[in-house]
Image (tube, rainbow, N blue to C red):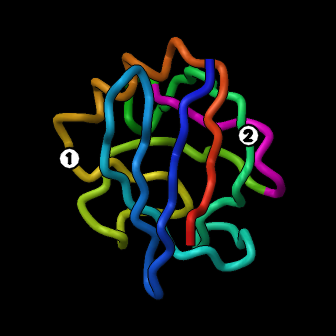
Amino acid sequence: MIAYLVRNRKDTHIDSILLADGHKFDCLELPYLDNKRSVSAIKDGLYPILVDMSYNKNREVIELRDVENRSQIQIHYASSIKSLAGCIGVKIQEEEKMIFNILKNYKYLKIVTLC
């Protein structure tokens, strides 16, 4: 199964919507800056989803695999753009666990940018 992240680029950040299992979740990402580590959103593409243990968060997380020149790209709650280092931020903290429970059953996340 494939979940989708649909992006709308802004000058300072990316607003995105995660679509999975009939649900829509508002997300936030850094601007796209040529896929540079820690300061850029990742490229559009199809990424395998992995449930992995995050030892600094002390829980399982959703991580995207096979991201060119990047590692540990996760989907997690982010209160602001400043709390991101290339990951996909979930805008509403209460939705983070729901997203985890949905995406753990998916194999891929397809990321596409509209504008």
Res. 97 image quadrant: top left
**Residue depicted at 74% across the width and 48% down the height:** 45
Alpha carbon distance from label 2 to label 1 = 24 Å
Inspect the image, locate mark 1, and give the three-letter code of the amino acid beneath it.
Ile
Q: In front of the other: label 2 or label 1?
A: 2
- Crowd band around label 2 with a 10 angstrom C-alpha radius: few (<14), some (14–19), many (20+): some
SS at mark 2 in the image: strand
Asked if the magenta segment contains residue 64, the reply would be: yes
**Residue depicted at 76% across the width and 47% down the height:** 67
Asked if the magenta segment contains residue 19, the reply would be: no
Q: Is residue 100 left or right of residue 97?
A: right
Which label number is shown at residue 92? 1
**Residue depicted at 28% across the width and 67% down the height:** 80
The residues colored magenta run 61-69
Along the line of sight, which residue is nearer the eye, 40 or 44? 44
Which label's residue is closer to the chain start, 2 or 1? 2
SS at mark 1 in the image: loop
**Residue depicted at 36% across the width and 70% down the height:** 81
Where residue 79 appears, as percent x and y from the top left, is 24, 60
**Residue for badge 2:** 46
Where residue 60 appears, as percent x and y from the top left, is 45, 22
Inspect the image, locate mark 2, and give the three-letter code of the amino acid beneath it.
Leu
